[in-house]
Amino acid sequence: MVTANLMSERRMLIPNNPITGLLLAIPGYFFGVWLGNVFGLFDDQNTGVILGYTVATAAFLVGMGFLNYPLTRLLGWPVTPISESEPDAGLSRYFRLSLDHKVIGLQYLFTILIMLLLGGIGAMMIRSSLLVPDSSITPPGQYIALIGLHSVMMIFITSAVIVGPFGNYLVPLMIGARRMAFPRLEALSFWLVPPAAVILAVAAFWGGFPTGWTGYPPLSEQAGQGMDSYIVGFGLIALALVVSGVNMLATIITLRAPGMTWTRLPIFVWGIFTTSILGMLAAPVLTAAIVMLAMDRSVQTSFFLSSNGGSNYLWENLFWFFGHPEVYIFILPAFGIVMEIVPHFARKPLWGYRTGVVGLFGVALLSWFVWQHHLFVSGIAPVLRPFYTLSTELISIPTGIIFLVVLGTMWRARIWFSVPMLFCMGFLVNFLIGGISGVYLSDVPTDVTLHGSYFSMAHFHYTIMGGEIFGLMAAVYYWLPKMTGRMMSETIGKLHFWWMFVAFNSTFFPLFIIGLLNMPRRVAQYNPALQGLNIWVSVSAFFLFGSMVLFAGNLVYALAFSGRRALANPWHARSLEWQVPTPVPAHNFDRVPVITGGPYDYGMPNARPVADFGGIRGVTSGA
Amino acid sequence: MKTIRIHEADRPHALRLLTIWLVLSIVGVIVALQIHIPPGDQSIQGADQSRTMTLMTALATPIFIGVVLMIVYSAFAFRNRGPELVDGPPMLGNTPIQIAWITGSTILVLFLALVGITSLASSNVAQAVGAPGRSIGQSGGQTGSGTAGGSGSELQIQVIGQQWYFTYRYQDYGGVETTHLYLPNDRPVELHVTSLDVVHSFWAYQLGVKADANLGVDNVIHVTPQKLGSFQVRCAELCGLWHGAMADSSGKVVSQSDFDSWIQQQQQSFTDIQKAVPSYAPFYFPDPLTKGS
């Protein structure tokens, strides 16, 4: 009977898979273009292209099967509750619409790693071009197209790289739930990402877009059809952020197992919680701005054109009102990862758990009050500058708290130097440099020289790549055994860490100096006196890419060739997600567990086991 | 508030860390103070930025050394050397230390913000950093906040950004337009930065000046050159295809007499040009007819 219902839910008229999705998306695109060209009032193609991408995405989602459930309900056919439905099995489930948070987590992980490879190749092309001070390797048009594609691709990735794979996979396991609160929204948040990435990549065929990730008008209104990819792609990612934020918050608030009090919540879940608040509230602002930009480009409104009564400051403010919380959307889950992983390898309780949570909330709260520090030299009202200097510098207080918590956890510990721990320590050093350089940028007098230079570029690469991506690496090495049942090689992992750490710093530290020496961001031509330093940076960047190739090799070897099965709890960690068997059972827990102890109670003489897996009779869902 | 009592077992570690930190910090701060940080002293504003950056570096060095030292020290002193996994002491936190850390970082942050804001408020930096953007056409004598001496004594120059070069319009010399920026030494300058198309950013590197150029907006900044020499002008906001080439290294700070003869030459050639082509920009601020010399 279960199967029958699944049939009615899944197989309506057509088989639902990405190929069907693609087969529907292509005519969808042409239908959208036709519609735009018929009803578009103007002879440029922007209306058609924007509608084409939008209709194609919608058609793709229909082909994936997102309409089946609403239609089933609409027609009054019986549906199976998710908690009773049989899960998919086999490799093909990773290519279908799945409502299992574990499948979605892995779908996210591999999609994003592939996108990371694309973005990384873009970075290598940029660095190749900068080997020479003129644009003889890459023509300037291709160069600005490259930086646009690299930056937006990386922003897509970093928005979701931790919340997507690890948030979706681990949050239910960590809080003792059998699923996410809204599994269909969860699936939607994932299936919006591949179309966004494809639409963005398609921009290359239109010659890219010239604005970088900031998309400042009037340049973005002057740009060709590549800009429409930016608009629709970014819009889809914003939608995914909102959907995933709502889902995470609902899950964490309502589905915690009995006994999983707020003070027993693993700190990683707090990281996801705070980042979800930011995503849910910030992304709609971007959506609004994106829609205005789309209308400016297609139906000739002029929200951002000062020549027709609009203002490009409106875009700059809306964009950064989203953009600054956005960078904390990147980093808060990475803070969570570091504070989560360090106790397990230090073999000590998290030092100052509550203070750490306060630190996360402090960062999340303050992130709303700093956005105009991106506009210090734009001609904003000068009375605002002292306030934004102060508010920006205040963020170092909650960030400092997070450092204190980690340092306190390592104090007099018995540190087990495993690869995840190494990446956490690398995170601390890199993020420290990123944070300190941020103070230079928050101060108006010094920002006058540093704004828009390679200094700020080095700053955000230190925080995002040195911070978030190092956190991601720690997470992959740490949780991969639970997620895939395979363990990555520790020896290659250590080599990978040191290689990546040295190459990363060798790549990005000189960029602070290059920025101080008068090299602006996003230029294809630069002062020939800086060629030596740029060659150094480029060569280091190639080495950095090499370390990522090593990582990819390690990952592929572990998954496909090593054949070694990981233990259920290879790190001897106390937290809940390690207490379930590997592979994780279909519904995580046979019964919803009763949480009886904290996740980090190492060395406590009377520590209780973390949970009673017998559960309470009759309780099948949490909290 | 409870005083911070250091646990027996912590004492040797704390003492060792403190000693190493003090030694390294003193060395670090001395080294940091030696580093010459751009933009240098070609203008009063640039010199102030260099000073502020040196101060920040000197303050940041002990913090950087302290945190890295704690990470490295933990890595060596607190590593598990045995083959067995051993649990550490169950320390859950220490309220006095947390309060001390938060208080310390708050004081430091407030001090840094105070330094930044006071130097921003002092007349020198207020000139460099600029005054509110103002719509073109809204004429009047309004100048930026904190301008020393008022606008009367300042040389008025309009900086016009377009894809992909800057044009300079010398208001006080009959609206003569040039493609290179020459400034007389020791004279305060008021730059009116605007754009004819997309957003540009006027960056005169050695002068410590940066201001965005927006269509229809008059972004006012002030600069007082104090040393003869040349400077670089670059666009610092992505503005399209040739953004990277939107640079000019022949900006010059010259003596007043050199400036006078240069501007005369420019006026002459500009008169010839003007016979054939009208003034470049469709609109100007301040109005050239009322303020021309």
Image (spheres, coloured by chain):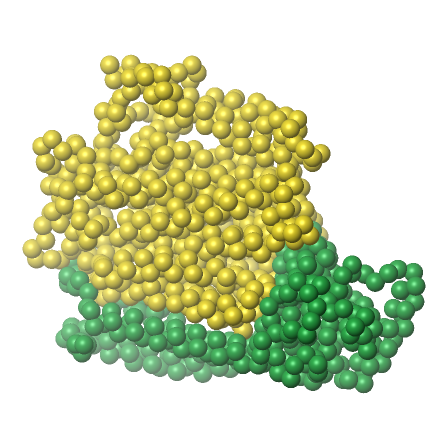
Chain colours: A yellow, B green
Left or right, A568 with respect to B44, comes to left
Looking at the image, is A391 positioned above or below residue A293? below
Is A240 above or below relative to B14? above
Would you say residue B268 is visible in this rendering? yes
Instruction: Give the x, y percent position of residue A459.
Output: 48, 62
Residue found at x 85% / y 81%: B261
- For the point 90% across and 73% down, the residue is B268
The image quadrant where one finds the C terminus of chain A is top left
Q: In the shown orientation, is residue A489 left or right of residue A119? A: left
Q: Judge by depth and name the residue closer to the eye, B266 or A114.
A: B266
**Residue A604, position as x, y percentages in the image:** 11, 57
Seen in the image, is A617 located left or right of residue A509?
Answer: left
Which one is in front, A338 or A206?
Answer: A206
Front-most of A74 and A153? A74
Query: What's the residue at 23%, 50% (across, down)?
Result: A266
Expressed as whole percent of the image width and height from the top left, the position of residue A71 reads: 38, 20
Q: Quadrant of residue A13?
A: top left
Q: Position of residue B147 (x, y in %)?
A: 61, 79
Question: How many circles with numbers are drawn on the protein?
Answer: 0
Q: Can see residue A490?
A: no
Which residue of the protein is positioned furthest toward the left in this rendering?
A606
Quadrant where the N terminus of chain A sits is: top left
